[in-house]
Amino acid sequence: MEQSFTINQEVTSSKRGATVKQMILIVEDDPSLVELLSYNLEREGFDITVAMDGEEACDAVEDQTPDLILLDWMIPNVSGIEVCRRIRRSEASRNTPIIMLTARGEEADRVRGLDSGADDYVTKPFSPQELIARIRAVLRRTNPEADSESLEYDNIRMDLLAHRVTRADEAIKLGPTEFRLLRVFLERPGRVFSREQLLDKVWGRDVYVETRTVDVHIRRLRKALNEKDRPDLIRTVRSAGYALDTSAI
């Protein structure tokens, strides 16, 4: 087990309003460090899930598709380096941003971590404020749409500030849930989301909602987007989920 760190300053919470929360997977076997990271990241508006070893981390990535992974090097069963390599070899997760968070601070270790596919490398001990700044920087680089004031795909445009959606310059009326659902799709067009993943991102991980509820709101979203016989851009992937994709036409 790696040496844990001591937090000596608090992170100021930022208000994210009713936006879709981004989910961070913490892969760390030190419970005290997991608690501290979770506390600070949740205050910043992130959803958190935790894996305590390498095998659990690989399963979590496959099941939940996090927006970013904080990955310790020295974890049981499968090392962080090998976890990183497996993620990069997977078609579904190869673009998921990874920050290595480890006590191994030698230059050779940094090079090895980055060569294995990590997007950034942070050594312990570290400043929580710096870590969160690095997380946001990596998320902006890998998913710039997440911090945009508007999202666009094909002829659909979502104005996040005005809370409005248009298609071919015509206003589309959406309920709050359909708006959040469409935002998830617009942030990652072409990506297939399972019903469970959509539940986590749109309703939240602490709310119990049946998976068939997703199908109900997908139908409502389709009906709103496809008025006036517009082409259906939401692709249903059998036994997998849904995607916003022009190949659905």
Image: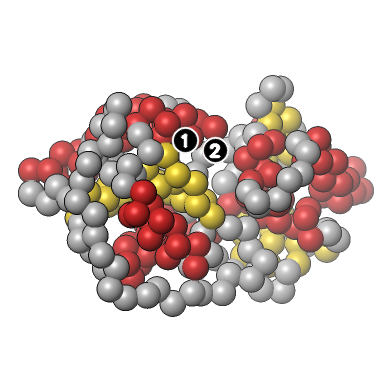
Residue 59 placement (x, y as % from top left): 47, 29
Can you name the residue that lies furthest to the front here? 32
Question: In the displayed structure, would residue 69 be above or below residue 45?
Answer: above
Horizontal side of residue 195 vs 75, given as left or right? right
Local crowd at mark 1 within 10 Å, few (<14), some, or many (≥20)?
many
Question: Gap between marks 1 and 2, in whole Å?
Answer: 6 Å
Can you name the residue that lies furthest to the right here? 228
Viewer-side residue, 195 vs 227: 195
Residue 166 placement (x, y as % from top left): 77, 61
- Which residue is rendered at x = 83% and y = 63% of the image? 171
- Quarter of the picture holding the N terminus: top left
Element type where label 2 sits in the image: helix
Question: In the displayed structure, would residue 224 be above or below residue 172?
Answer: above
Q: Which mark is residue 171?
A: none
- Which residue is rendered at x = 29% and y = 28% of the image? 78
Horizontal side of residue 200 vs 32, given as left or right? right
- Quarter of the picture holding the C terminus: top right
Residue 81 placement (x, y as % from top left): 24, 34
- Which residue is rendered at x = 34% and y = 31% of the image? 54
Question: In the displayed structure, would residue 139 be above or below residue 185?
Answer: below
Viewer-side residue, 172 vs 192: 192
Residue 240 placement (x, y as % from top left): 66, 26
Element type where label 1 sits in the image: helix
Residue type, mark 1 in image: Val
Local crowd at mark 2 within 10 Å, few (<14), some, or many (≥20)?
some
Q: Is residue 117 something one can see in this rendering?
A: yes
Q: What residue is disc 1 on?
A: 61
Q: What residue is disc 2 on?
A: 64
Do the CB atoms of the residues marked 1 and 2 lie less than 8 Å apart? yes
- Which residue is rendered at x = 29% and y = 32% of the image? 76
Viewer-side residue, 2 vs 203: 2
